[in-house]
Image (tube, rainbow, N blue to C red):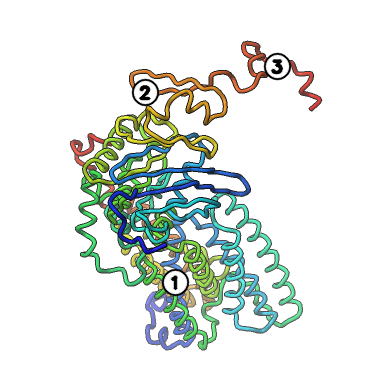
Amino acid sequence: MPSSSTPAPTEPLLQIENLGVRLGGRQVLEGLDLSLESGVLCGLIGENGAGKTTLLRSILGLQRIASGTIRLAGGSVGKARDLVGYVPQKIAFDPQLPLRTRDLVELGLSGRHFGLPWRRRRYQAATKAALAAVGAEHFADQRLGRLSGGQQQRAVIAHALVREPRLLLLDEPLANLDFRSTTSLVQLLGTLVREHGLTVLVTAHDMNPLLPVLDRLVYLVGGRAATGTVDEVVRPDVLSGLYGYPVTVLRHHGRFLVLPDAPDGPGEMRHAGTELPPPSPREEA
Amino acid sequence: MLQALAVDWSAFFADSAVQTALVIGVCAALINASLGVFTLLRGHAFAGHALGDISSAGGAASFLLGISALWGFLGMAWAAALAMAWLGLREARERDLATGIVLGAGLGLTALLLYLAMTTTSASGSTVTVLFGSLFALPPSLAPVVLLLTFGTLCVIVLGYRPLLLIAADADLARAQGIPVALLELVYLLLLGLAAAISAMTVGAILATALLLGPAGAALQLATRPVWAFLLAALLAVLAVVLGILLSWQSYYWFSGTSWPVSFFIVLLTLLEYLGAGLWTAFWGGSTWTTAAPPPSACAEDC
């Protein structure tokens, strides 16, 4: 294939085709296709173990893939690392860590450079801009470990933004946030996409907080995905096919609840309403 | 009485044992303080302690084999460091369990080797030397070697400072930037083994933890910037070692002609530094920015 370092404007920023990933003998992702243009906010929705983090790690080039291709701006994943910013899940900085928000953001630029740790001036303007972009100026000089969960999220987002990536990956950023922090973080993601032209891929086990800003949706169940707009994906027929059993989609004030139509197995139904199952047959096993 | 307090400086510095002790002791302080900061930030305090303890088996073996104690300590510490890198330092609980079991086995080996050294050779003082250090009894020829190793270690730390700091903050962030985290972890563990070996010779294998964690722990309570944490830890460690050597030397006059072990004084001083830093933090609020609350208006969005 000829060199494609200058992609045509119509070429998608992220193009995933038939992606398959195996982890320890288990098929974690299977036949996944996804194409994202610039300026799109895409939600990656699924339960724990659905393969959300694996997909993000694959895009980062940290995960060996079994089949398929991932292309970033027309190039391979390893060459395009600078195009991707990453916000890992479960961020919790050690209270003893002698780093201020400002220092972490600067490490976004300087962190991979070996050598004498000076030349700070060069980084300061970019650091300041990244802090402003996430509204973190007022805790820029505070120690990371003393910040609230929402503030730590913003600090890490600024750390990821400071290199001016075109694609931002966030892994469960809304987990463990209160309602107010959730709302303001979702607004921030919307702003990054609409005003800064970023493409954002954000994982969540609950799609509802993201709905106000969501352009696209990847609904992951057991490594397989349904992709499209919210209206295209969050439908009983699509999700039933994905889950492999009939599900109901309840809609209330613009929010969704996905429920199984019937209980998993016939055995559950029989015991509903009774206190305890009869002990005799289970004792044998 | 006056003689007990007045230090005879010229005699102190003229003593060749003191000279060697000062050079190797300061090297041990610098290496341990700087690695101690990373060790604490990464939550590897127990692994750092274990490396020191396990190195005692190598120290004991060096008596049996008749080789320099440094290579004995270093060989065993590096073997343990490689084992830790191979086992992987991921889950804190798993890691502590594996470390604890290997530590027990290492100390058991030490017991055997020390027994053999005592029964088959004339090295009667080997137990105390290996476990509690022999700073005043080190051969002067060791000083250049230790100086070189220390210089090399400090160069690696300074050159790898930013990637190592980012790994300490969050290893996933470092991986996402393409930093070779596994390779740097291996380098860090080997340097930690070197630190353990050198401090095993100064304060003893058992007490090596004190020099690794005490000054770094005190510095992390006080420092407001990463660079300051390293400089302060180095300063506190050097202070403890130099003052410890001086006190041990001077204690000859206090206890009617028998000086107390230098390890005791160094370890005591690192403890005092750590406690002092804790008291300072408690009374003066520690790091300056932690007391300064953000303005309430700016806080409205996400507090």
Residue A7 appears in the rendering? yes
> Mark 1 belongs to which amino acid?
Ile
Q: Which mark is residue A277?
A: 3
Instruction: List x then y, in percent, for residue B158.
Output: 37, 71
Residue lying at the far top in this picture: please name it: A273
Residue B282 appears in the rendering? no
* Quarter of the image where the C terminus of chain B is located: top left
> Mark 2 belongs to which amino acid?
Arg
**Is B10 located above or below residue A53 in the figure?**
below
- Let me know if marks 1 and 3 both belong to one chain: no
Q: Quadrant of residue A280?
A: top right
- Camera-side mark, 2 or 1: 2
Instruction: List x then y, in percent, for residue B193.
Output: 54, 69
Marks 2 and 3, how far apart in space? 37 Å
Say whether residue A101 is left or right of residue A57.
Answer: left
Residue in view at x 53 percent, y 40 percent: A223
Badge 3 density bin: few <14, some 14–19, many ≥20, Cα 10 Å: few
Instruction: List x then y, in percent, for residue B138.
Output: 54, 82
Disc 2: host chain: A
Mark 2 — residue?
A255
Mark 1 — residue?
B31
| Image marks 2 and 3: residues in contact by CB distance under 8 Å | no
| Image marks 1 and 3: residues in contact by CB distance under 8 Å | no
